[in-house]
Amino acid sequence: MNDSNMFLEGLWAADGSGAGAVRPAQQARSRAKLIRLLQAGRNALQAGSLEEMKISEIVREAGTSVGAFYGRFENKEGFFLAIQEMAIAEIDVNMVDLFDGLNARQASLPELLYKLSAFWVSLYRDNRGLYRAAFKHASTLPDAWTPFKRLGYRGSAQIAENVLSRTEELGIECDEHRVKTAMQFVNGLLVNSIINDPGPVRLDSPEMETHVARFLCTFLGVEHIEPSSFDRNRNAKSKRRPA
């Protein structure tokens, strides 16, 4: 199954109401058209608000028609929920790939925290339009924030599993509650950066990833190591490994 089909399977199999916001497309051509619609909507939200989104522009970008849009979605709100589900299914796949890659090369705990921080900041940057719309419409769309809550719960559990396997090896006292609390602070910081943009460090500031990583290291009791040393440490470890 390719990534696009995997995202759609995640959308239709999801637990939230977004799973019922889109009528499934069975044929490959219809599925491809649906993906183009959802991606066009995602792009529109990055550039503006849900109210400013024009269905006529969405279908033009996707290469389809208004009639085809309403044959698939009940309304703009249902379309928004479906975009969320696709985005979160994509994030789930990418997170698995992230940890699989880190574990395959036996990345150290500081490296894992730095790579995780870069990944986590990027997912907020890449989906800021979805976060803004969900926050703004949470009172009128009861399920608007639910997909992000599910992402937070699943993501924190997966992060805790990968972090704790390393803290145990290093003799660092840490538990699942502490890791999840750390991620709660990180999520709060990044949501605030999207909604209020208070500064001085903003979401697009190059140093945001570094500050998040340093916070995680400090909060979890992990020695801070500059990222430039990760490759050197890995090379030294491989040289010490018996042939």
Image (cartoon, helix red, strand yellow):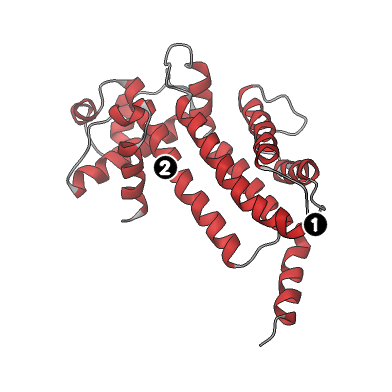
As drawn, is 60 to the left or to the right of 80? left
Q: Which mark is residue 89?
A: 2
Q: Which mark is residue 240?
A: none
Rate crowding at label 2 as few (under 14), some (14 to 19) or many (20 or more) other CA atoms within 10 Å.
many
Give the amino acid type for the residue marked by disc 1 in the picture: Glu
Q: Position of residue 154 (x, y in %)?
A: 51, 39
Q: Is residue 115 visible?
A: no
For mark 2, give the secondary structure.
Answer: helix
In this view, the residue in front, 203 or 112, is 112
Q: Position of residue 108 (x, y in %)?
A: 70, 61
Q: Quadrant of the C terminus?
A: bottom right
Name the residue tied to disc 1: 226
Q: Is residue 105 visible?
A: yes
**Residue at x 74% of width, y 64% of height:** 230
In this view, the residue in front, 175 or 209, is 175
* Rendered image quadrant of residue 202: top right
* Rendered image quadrant of residue 109: bottom right
For mark 1, give the secondary structure.
Answer: loop
**Residue at x 50% of width, y 36% of height:** 151
**Residue at x 34% of width, y 49% of height:** 6
